[in-house]
Each structure stands twice: as structure tokens, then as C-alpha cells.
């Protein structure tokens, strides 16, 4: 039973990071109907920023985190303005291919600048693990879960109640009608990318605290997992991304503990296939029926 | 108030609107009528800035709005109720109405306007917490109109408000349009239901395959022989 619960906590730890990253995919998809394949590489950008500011510039962790967020936001917004915005009225496949191109550009630029060898990420907290009813929870795990939950709560409140949040929801439902109501959709899209990348930046920081190796292609795997989490929960639906991430993380960790380490990815993808077969719109996806 | 001169529009190689000219004066209800595909909705979308025009001039209150970004027009007092209502179905009725007032900052006046919308459409008040997607077609039309009214339009452009509604509901909607006009909002009405549109409109323009083929007062056009044959069932 102890093993089960500690695996559950482990799964929650990695799953909630997937969820943070998945939010970026799902929010962007919701509004511009684009799978931003470069989103995973934003994690890599964030991880390098974190390691450079912490190790080379020797700034305190909080400053490093803020710089990481800032750099990720700048990258995300620039990519949107330079690569995606000019293609907004072209066929969707054009921007999809562009997204893959941006992803390759980021990875190869990082390879050129930083080399292929991975850099270790320093240990920030040397706080002993917390004990809770016989289960050991590392401080990083507890911190990750708490920080992520707070962020998700903030995001939900922002989307639900703020004016900008309502504009995001309106624009993601109907681009043209949102404009007729006076919403500057271009700015709303930029804001969406900015929020998604800020979350990815925090996600990157949390990710390298758990898996302390920074390399040019490190964003691919969490990027892919988060993308799948977003689809699993229902792409375009914000609570879906949160749920999808957590479900994936827990499934992954329980498979590793009870079935086989090698099969964990297969099981996770298997779950995705089954869910999509049974409910093609994802766990929280709704069939949109239009009344005429 | 609205002056459209020699408006031309192309969708790719297709010449959709050919030298369309018409005008709307303050306080009027003006109708654009014509069959499906005559270009009525294209005109509204061109005026709203949703599709780029290929020639001509659109003046709103004397100001050229040819290249004005679509989202700036509602703040200027030019608001469209789009074809097929287009309510935000995953948002509540109240949120839809709030989005209608997106560019406004005068909270107190907004609350007064909200109450006024609820006077026109009591059913929206009953259902204000409900998701807009769960409303009936008629209620969605009311919501789309209420949402537009929340923007305090000087000119309200309506695209096919009667589409898909029962004759009784159409009567109700048109009565409200008349009421809104009496309260001081100028209206440009695009309709396939020529009978209803002409009986309401002060003036009307008849469109055929992207051209204005006839214009005149609503009551004159109602008597017009050709029109009766084409649209009014003899």
C-alpha cells in the first residue's frame, strides 16, 4: 500500500508538470487551431535559461525562475508574431509544417550554441523529504504539486472572470464574431501564447528539478507527453489538459511500478488510443452541436 | 450615416459585389433584400471589415472605414448581428451580453443598458446564467440582438434575423427591431424574407447576383410587379 501511494505521488509529480505544459498546447489550439509543435522546445529554452542563470550567472533561484519565465514568453511571442501570424489565413497545414520547422530551428540552434552534451542541473533545495503517514515525499515533489495547483487555480480564475480571459474564450469560440464585438483578436492570441509559454517556463524549471539534465532535444519528450495529455483531456479544453496530464503521469508511474518500466510509454499511448476510440473528443471533450 | 459607394469585392477569381452603392440615413430602417447568394451578407461583412474589399468606398459618419480593423468598428458605433446568430455557446447568457459591451468602460450606463435589454427580452433575464448553447433558436436570436445592443450601436446591422424561426417568432423579432429603431438606433437589415423586411423598412435596395437592381421606399417596392413575382409569391 505504501508503494502504491508513493507511486501515486510520483505520478502526480510528473503528471502535473505535463499538465502545466499541456495548458500551453490546449490554449493555443483553442484559439488558433494550431498544434504548436515548438511548444516542447520552449521547455528546452527555459531549461537552458535556468541552468545558465543559476550556474553561470549565479543568481538566486527566484530570480532564475523569473528570468526563465521572461525568456520563454519572449521566445513564444516572437515565434507567434514572426512564424505563425503571417500564415493565419493560409491553410492550416502550412502553419502546422511551420511549427515543426520552428521546433527544428530551436533544437538545432541550441545544438550549435550549447553542443550536444547534456548539462547537469544543480540541486537547489537540500531540504530533507517530508514524511506523511509512512509515505516519503521529497520537497521538490511537494513544491511542484503545490505550485502547479496554485497556477492552475489562478489560470482558471483569470479565464473565467477577467475581461481578457473572456476575450480569450470568445475568440477561441468564434474568431470573427469576437472581432465584431470589439475584441482585438491579434492581441488576444499574443496573450494566449504569452501565458502558455510562461507556464511552460515554470514547467521547465520544475521538470529539470526532477530530471536534472539539460540538452538540446530534452524538450521533445515532455512536449510530446504534454501534447498527448492535451488530446487525452480534450484539446482546446483547459480543465481537460490538467486532467489529461495528471492521468498520464499516474498511469506512467503505476505502470513502471507494477508492470514494466519499458512498457510505461506503450501503456500511456494505449490509454490515449482507447480513449480516442471510445470518446474521440477526449475525456472532457464535448460534442459541439449547433442549433440553427 | 452609412455611405457605400461603388463597392467591389472578389473572393479569389469570383467577382462577388459589383459596384454596389447605397446609403443609410440617421434614424432609418434600410433593407437589403435579394435571393440566396445575391451578395447581401458579403456587403455586411465588407462593411464590418471582416473581408477586404477590392474597390470603392465605405463611409461611416463621413469617415472612410475601408481599411479600419474589424474590432475597432463596434467602438465607433457600428455593430453587426451576424447571420446564424453566432452566440458564444460555451459562455453564459450574461457573459455573452458582457462581451457585447467589451469596448465600453462606463459601468453604470452598462448596467442600465443591461436592464433595458432584459426589458426587451425578458426570457434572457430568466436564463442569464444558462449557457448560450442551450437556448432555442429564437432565444439565441434575441441574445445576439441583445449582445449587439450592449455595444450602444448608432447603426445596427442585422443579417437574416428571421432565419430558421417560426412565423410567430419572426413577428416577435421584427416587432422588437421596430421598437429598437423607434428608440433611436438606425438599422440596416439584410433579409430573404422580403415581405417582412419591406413592410418594416423606410427604404430598400434589391440585390441580384452582386448588383443593386432596384431601390425605393419599402411600401413602393411591396407594390412592385417584378418583385412580387420574384420574392413575394405573386
Image (cartoon, grey):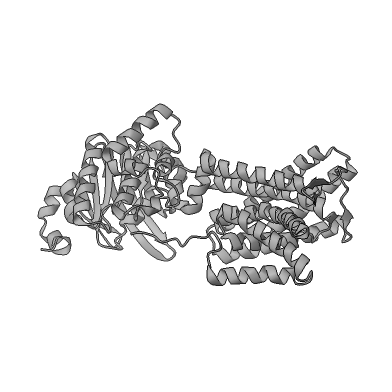
Q: Residue at x 22, y 57 (%)?
A: B166
Q: Can residue A138 be seen in this view?
A: yes
Q: In this view, does B3 lie to the left or right of B179?
A: right
**Is B128 situated above or below B10?**
above
**Is A262 situated above or below A147?**
below
**Is A224 situated above or below A42?**
below
Q: Which of B17 and A15 is in front in this view?
A: A15
Q: Which of A224 and B186 is in front in this view?
A: A224
Residue A257 x/y as whole percent: 77, 65
Residue B95 x/y as whole percent: 43, 42
Rendered-image quadrant of the C terminus of chain A: bottom left
Res B101 quadrant in image: top left
Q: Which residue is drawn at 9% across and 54% down?
A: B223
Res A130 quadrant in image: top right
Q: Among all residues in the image, which is located at the extreme top?
A: B108
Residue B92 x/y as whole percent: 42, 46
Q: Residue at x 45, y 51 (%)?
A: B90
Residue A3 x/y as whole percent: 78, 59
Q: Which residue is drawn at 68% across and 50% down?
A: A76
Rendered-image quadrant of the N terminus of chain A: bottom right
Q: Can residue A74 be seen in this view?
A: no
Q: Which of A271 and B61 is in front in this view?
A: A271
Q: Nearer the viewer, residue A71 or A165?
A: A165
Amino acid at each position: 500500500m505504501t508503494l502504491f501511494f508513493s507511486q501515486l505521488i510520483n505520478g502526480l509529480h510528473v503528471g502535473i508538470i505535463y499538465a502545466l505544459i499541456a495548458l500551453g498546447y490546449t490554449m493555443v489550439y483553442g484559439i488558433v487551431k494550431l498544434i504548436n509543435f515548438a511548444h516542447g522546445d520552449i521547455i528546452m529554452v527555459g531549461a537552458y535559461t535556468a541552468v545558465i542563470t543559476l550556474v553561470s550567472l549565479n543568481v538566486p533561484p527566484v530570480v532564475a525562475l523569473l528570468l526563465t519565465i521572461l525568456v520563454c514568453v519572449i521566445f513564444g511571442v516572437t515565434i507567434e508574431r514572426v512564424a505563425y501570424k503571417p500564415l493565419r489565413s493560409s491553410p492550416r497545414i502550412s502553419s502546422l509544417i511551420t511549427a515543426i520547422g520552428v521546433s527544428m530551428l530551436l533544437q538545432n540552434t541550441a545544438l550549435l550554441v550549447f553542443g550536444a552534451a547534456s548539462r547537469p542541473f544543480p540541486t537547489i533545495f537540500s531540504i530533507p523529504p517530508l514524511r506523511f503517514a509512512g509515505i516519503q515525499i521529497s520537497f521538490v515533489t511537494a513544491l511542484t504539486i503545490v505550485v502547479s495547483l496554485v497556477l492552475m487555480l489562478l489560470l482558471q480564475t483569470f479565464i473565467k472572470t477577467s475581461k481578457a480571459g473572456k476575450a480569450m474564450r470568445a475568440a477561441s469560440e468564434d474568431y470573427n464574431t469576437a472581432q465584431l464585438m470589439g475584441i482585438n483578436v491579434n492581441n488576444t492570441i499574443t496573450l494566449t501564447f504569452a501565458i502558455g509559454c510562461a507556464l511552460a517556463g515554470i514547467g521547465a524549471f520544475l521538470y529539470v528539478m526532477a530530471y536534472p539534465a539539460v540538452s538540446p532535444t530534452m524538450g521533445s519528450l515532455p512536449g510530446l507527453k504534454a501534447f498527448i495529455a492535451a488530446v487525452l483531456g480534450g484539446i482546446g479544453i483547459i480543465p481537460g489538459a490538467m486532467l489529461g496530464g495528471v492521468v498520464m503521469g499516474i498511469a506512467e508511474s503505476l505502470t513502471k511500478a507494477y508492470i514494466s518500466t519499458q512498457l510505461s510509454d506503450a501503456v500511456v499511448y494505449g490509454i490515449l488510443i482507447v480513449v480516442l476510440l471510445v470518446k474521440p473528443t477526449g475525456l472532457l471533450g464535448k460534442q459541439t452541436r449547433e442549433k440553427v | 450615416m452609412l455611405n457605400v459607394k461603388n463597392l467591389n469585392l472578389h473572393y479569389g477569381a469570383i467577382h462577388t459585389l459589383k459596384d454596389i452603392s447605397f446609403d443609410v440615413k440617421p434614424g432609418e430602417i434600410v433593407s437589403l433584400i435579394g435571393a440566396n447568394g445575391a451578395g447581401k451578407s458579403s456587403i455586411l461583412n465588407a462593411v464590418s471589415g471582416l473581408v477586404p474589399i477590392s474597390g470603392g468606398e465605405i463611409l461611416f459618419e463621413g469617415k472612410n472605414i475601408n481599411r479600419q480593423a474589424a474590432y475597432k468598428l463596434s467602438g465607433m458605433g457600428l455593430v453587426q448581428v451576424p447571420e446564424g446568430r453566432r452566440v458564444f455557446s460555451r459562455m453564459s447568457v450574461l457573459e455573452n451580453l458582457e462581451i457585447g459591451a467589451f469596448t465600453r468602460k462606463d459601468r453604470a450606463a452598462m448596467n442600465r443598458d443591461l436592464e433595458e435589454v432584459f426589458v426587451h427580452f425578458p426570457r434572457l433575464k430568466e436564463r442569464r446564467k444558462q449557457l448560450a448553447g442551450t437556448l432555442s433558436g429564437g432565444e439565441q436570436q434575441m441574445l445576439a440582438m441583445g449582445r449587439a445592443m450592449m455595444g450602444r450601436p448608432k447603426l445596427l446591422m442585422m443579417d437574416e434575423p428571421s432565419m430558421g424561426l417560426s412565423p410567430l417568432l419572426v413577428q416577435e423579432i421584427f416587432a422588437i427591431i421596430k421598437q429598437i429603431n423607434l428608440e433611436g438606433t438606425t438599422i440596416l437589415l439584410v433579409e430573404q424574407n422580403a415581405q417582412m423586411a419591406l413592410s418594416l423598412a423606410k427604404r430598400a435596395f434589391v440585390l441580384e447576383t452582386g448588383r443593386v437592381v432596384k431601390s425605393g421606399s419599402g411600401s413602393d417596392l411591396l407594390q412592385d410587379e417584378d418583385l412580387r413575382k420574384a420574392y413575394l409569391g405573386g
